[in-house]
Image (cartoon, rainbow, N blue to C red):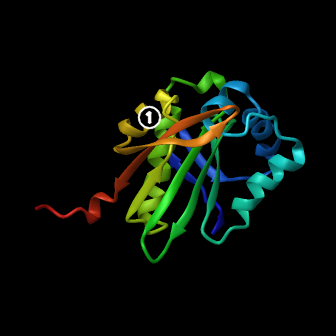
Amino acid sequence: MANGTRVESGRVVLCPFNDAFWAPGRRWYNDPEIITLTSDDQSELTESEFRATIEADLTADHSVVFGIRDENEDPIGIGILRNIDPVHGGGELHITIGERRCWNQGYGAEAISAMRDYAFEVAGCHKVLSTPFLENPRMIRCLEKCGFEREGTLREALKQGDQFIDIVLMGLINPKDVTVS
């Protein structure tokens, strides 16, 4: 699947990940607050490490990478649908809104909604999962705002520095696939 197509949704545009995203993407992935809230590895990424991280998904058969732009077409984040499983209909949603001016402004929810819709309508997913850190309440609230439900907590699932941290398993089933009992 590799690189996303253009999807416009409100103030957010999902687009193919291109050259405009490499420099800001590395800056976002090296932001200390973003690292603490999203990465088990607390060290900064070199340019080659960041490239390898993104290219792993760009070249994977079952991943889609989006650049996220605001209404002015400025790069503000990166979205990845990973492990899209055509047999079981699952996929994992990962998102980083890196531009601080866009935090707490609803851009994350708009991007998640657009990616969720893409996962259901284009990628054919039955269920989409996301696994934010328990210590990332903004992401948890954002996912809940987009219809995701908390399915459980994976206690001490990752080691971050010297501590083990919990992650929250959040999921959403395609509303078209839900049967009424």
Relative to 60, is 149 on the left or the right? Answer: left
Amino acid type shown at disc 1:
Ile
Tell me the quarter of the picture where residue 31 sits: top right
Q: With respect to residue 15, does 87 lie above or below?
A: below
Q: State the image quarter where residue 158 is shown.
A: top right
Residue highlighted by disc 1: 140
The residue depicted at 59 percent of the width and 26 percent of the height is 102
For mark 1, give the secondary structure: helix
- Residue at x 53%, y 66% (from the top left corner): 84
Relative depth, front residue between 168 and 176: 168
Q: Give the image location of residue 75, x and y in percent.
A: 69, 38
Q: Is residue 141 above or below residue 79?
A: above
* Residue 119 percent coordinates (x, y): 47, 60
Location of the C terminus by quadrant is bottom left
The image quarter containing residue 124 is: bottom left
Q: What residue sits 72% from the left and 26% below the top?
A: 32
Quadrant the N terminus occupies: bottom right
